[in-house]
Amino acid sequence: MHLVLLGPPGAGKGTQGKRITQKYGIPNLSTGDMLRATVAEGGELGSKLKEVMDAGQLVSDALILQMIEERLAAPDCENGAIFDGFPRNGDQADALSELLGKHDRLLDAALYFNVSEEEVLRRLSGRLSCPNCGAVFHVTDNPPSRGGVCDACGHDGLKKRSDDEEGVIRQRLGVYREKTAPIIGYYKEKGLLHEIDAGRSPDTVFEDVTSLFGKK
Ligand code: AP5
């Protein structure tokens, strides 16, 4: 099973991707998490990436494709993968289709998590992320049980992401509208698109996701 998770920042792609991994054992390939891991390592590449991400812009296609190609070749992706935050523009969508074809694989579905920009702003301005394991929380909707401690891995240091400032969120939304939203039509034309109302609770959204897996 190969799945693309599409949707604006804060639509819940990471939240649902992790749940799919837990339930079905398919690895979640989050390009955002991979980039943040490189930033955390420091170095020249890390600081260049941080600059681009903190400006709410897209990182170069070449780097993203290299990361995805390497990750997809790992043994845990033998039976499929979830692409979370990739593709992000038409060229990346074409490159994914080519890459899968090269390995005799097919994309099964693109799940489009549709949510209002107002809700995106509410969610992202309250998001807390774990820099150690990538778990996400929300200050009011899904707070950690103990202050800034991650419930998933015990790391003491949950943080607001540096690109979750209101100005950067608005910039990311603009980039999404201009560059990423057009690929919704691309997958619709291929008959692969499944739109999910992501403005509801995480459990309700996941029920829709699992019912889709049932059909597949
Ligand atoms: P990335 O990390 O991919 O960020 P994003 O797409 O903007 O998505 P987010 O991680 O912000 O949101 P999400 O949809 O995963 O929501 P989440 O589940 O966390 O990318 C970051 C940057 O990296 C980009 O700006 C770009 O610079 C670069 N980049 C990444 N991929 C790239 C690519 N392919 N090409 C080029 N550049 C790339 O949930 C958000 C919050 O809402 C949480 O607090 C959560 O608890 C809460 N929540 C989730 N679901 C619900 C729900 N149903 N109801 C209420 N609250 C919810």
Image (cartoon, rainbow, N blue to C red):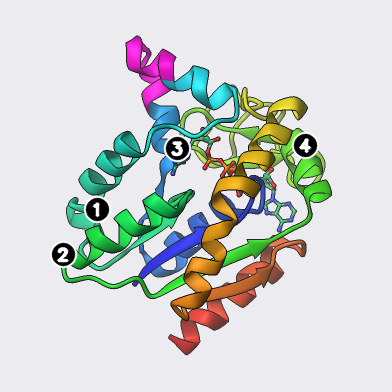
Q: CA distance from mark 4 to mark 3?
A: 21 Å
Q: Helix, strand, or loop for circle 3?
A: helix
Please say whether residue 33 is one of the residues in the magenta stretch: no
Mark 2 or mark 1: which is in front? 2
Dot 1 amino acid type: Leu
For mark 3, does the 10 Å Cα neighbourhood hold few (<14), some (14 to 19), or many (20 or more) residues?
some
Residue at x 38%, y 33% (from the top left corner)? 60
Q: CA distance from mark 3 to mark 2?
A: 24 Å
Location of residue 57 (image quadrant): top right
Q: Are marks 2 and 1 in contact (CB under 8 Å)?
A: yes
Looking at the picture, does residue 148 appear above or below residue 78? above
Asked if the beta carbon under badge 3 is closer than 8 A to the nearest atom of ligand 1, the reply is: yes
Percent x, y of residue 148:
67, 26
Residue 159 located left or right of residue 214: right
- What label does residue 103 carry, if any? 2
Q: Are marks 4 and 3 in contact (CB under 8 Å)?
A: no
Asked if the beta carbon under badge 1 is closer than 8 A to the nearest atom of ligand 1, the reply is: no
Residue 72 located left or right of residue 11: left
Residue indicated by mark 3: 33
**Quadrant of image for the C terminus:** bottom left
Location of residue 100 (image quadrant): bottom left
Dot 4 amino acid type: Val
Q: CA distance from mark 3 to mark 1?
A: 15 Å
Q: Helix, strand, or loop for circle 2?
A: loop
Dot 2 amino acid type: His
Mark 3 or mark 2: which is in front? 2
Choose between 206 and 147: the one closer to the eye.
Answer: 206
Q: Are marks 1 and 4 in contact (CB under 8 Å)?
A: no
Dot 3 amino acid type: Asp
